[in-house]
Structure formats: structure tokens, C-alpha cells
């Protein structure tokens, strides 16, 4: 996937059919927004404050997940809006792995393993 980041255009192929094409940035934008994970001193209160302020928030088990177009630029506003002690912040931008998962429903490593395992079995059978 690392090489695909530098390609002019890429195609996502699932079961022999092209399911998506575009530049890496176009495909990442189609998948969705950045996610900002926050852990605060009181995630319940922080979620309420962020929702009232109009942020798209999804409570996690031990963190809040906020969706945004530019997560890095949004971090200071999120911290100000919560008005609470923030223990950690993590910004995640969609990757080509996320794109592959979005269009195929599985991770690329799973798809690779499905094809490699039968080849290994055939190789073992040929050696016998």
C-alpha cells in the first residue's frame, strides 16, 4: 500500500471487479472524515458539551470519537469546548487500508491470506 500512495491513480479490485478508482486523496475523501479520539477527565460531560456545540461525536468505551474534515485543525477547538482536562488526543486520517476495507469489507491482509494459503497447499502437494 505504501507505493500506492505515490500513484497518480489507483483501482481497488474485489473478486476480479474494479470497485473504485481515483487518486489516493480522492479515494480517502470518499471514505470519510478524519477521526479525533479524545480521552478527558469526564467523557460523558465532554460528549454533551461537544454535541451542544455542534460537533459530530460518538462515545466510545473509554474515549470520545469526533468526526471532522480537518481533525488536526479542530483539536484546539475541541479542547476549548470540553473545558475539561484532556488526557490524550489522537488524530486519524483515512488511509488506503481504510479505503480497501470500506470498498471490500475486509482488510488487505485478510484478502492476501485467502490467496496465499491455497497456493501454499498446492506447493506442498507438488513436493510430495
Image (cartoon, rainbow, N blue to C red):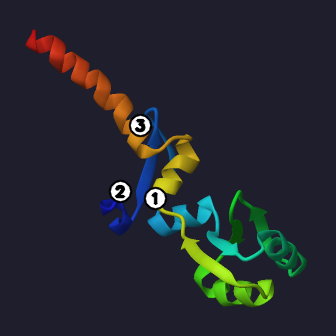
Relative to residue 35, is residue 59 drawn left or right?
A: right
For disc 2, the marked residue is: 1
Identify the residue at horizontal 67%, vertical 84% (top origin): 74
For the residues bearing labels 2 and 3, Cβ distance under 8 angstroms? no
* Quadrant of image for the N terminus: bottom left
In the foreground, 29 or 117: 117
Q: Does 74 sit left or right of 57 as displayed?
A: left
Q: Secondary structure at mark 1?
A: helix
Query: Of all residues shown, which one is farthest toward the left?
Result: 127
Tags 1 and 2 touching, CB below 8 Å: yes
User: Which residue position is annotated with label 1?
Assistant: 96
Q: Give how far apart the Cα atoms at labels 1 and 3 are.
A: 14 Å
Label 3's element? helix
Q: Position of residue 101 (x, y in %)?
A: 53, 48
> Looking at the image, is 119 positioned above or below residue 43?
above
| x 9%, y 14%: residue | 127
In the figure, 91 relative to 7: above or below?
below
Q: Secondary structure at mark 2?
A: loop
Going by the picture, which residue comes out furthest to the top?
128
The residue depicted at 67 percent of the width and 90 percent of the height is 76
* Tag of residue 111: 3
Q: Is residue 16 visible?
A: yes
Q: Which quarter of the image is occupied by the C terminus?
A: top left
Residue 55 x/y as whole percent: 80, 76
Circle 2 crowding by C-alpha within 10 Å: few under 14, some 14–19, many from 20: few
Q: Nearer the viewer, residue 8 or 95?
A: 95
Pinpoint residue 75: horizontal percent, then vertical percent: 65, 84
Q: Nearer the viewer, residue 109 or 25?
A: 109
Q: Earlier in the sequence, mark 1 or mark 2?
A: 2
Mark 1 and mark 2: span between their CA atoms?
7 Å
Amino acid at each position: 500500500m505504501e507505493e500506492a500512495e505515490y500513484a497518480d491513480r489507483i483501482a481497488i479490485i474485489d473478486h476480479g471487479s474494479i470497485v473504485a478508482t481515483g487518486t489516493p486523496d480522492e479515494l480517502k475523501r470518499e471514505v470519510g472524515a478524519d477521526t479525533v479520539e479524545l480521552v478527558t477527565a469526564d467523557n460523558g460531560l465532554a460528549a454533551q458539551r461537544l454535541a451542544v456545540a455542534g460537533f459530530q461525536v460518538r462515545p466510545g468505551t473509554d474515549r470520545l470519537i469526533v468526526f471532522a474534515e480537518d481533525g488536526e485543525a479542530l483539536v484546539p477547538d475541541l479542547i476549548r469546548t470540553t473545558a475539561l482536562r484532556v488526557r490524550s488526543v489522537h488524530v486519524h486520517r483515512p488511509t488506503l487500508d481504510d479505503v480497501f476495507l470500506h470498498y471490500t469489507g475486509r482488510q488487505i491482509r485478510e484478502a492476501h491470506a485467502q490467496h496465499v494459503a491455497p497456493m501454499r497447499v498446492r506447493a506442498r502437494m507438488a513436493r510430495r
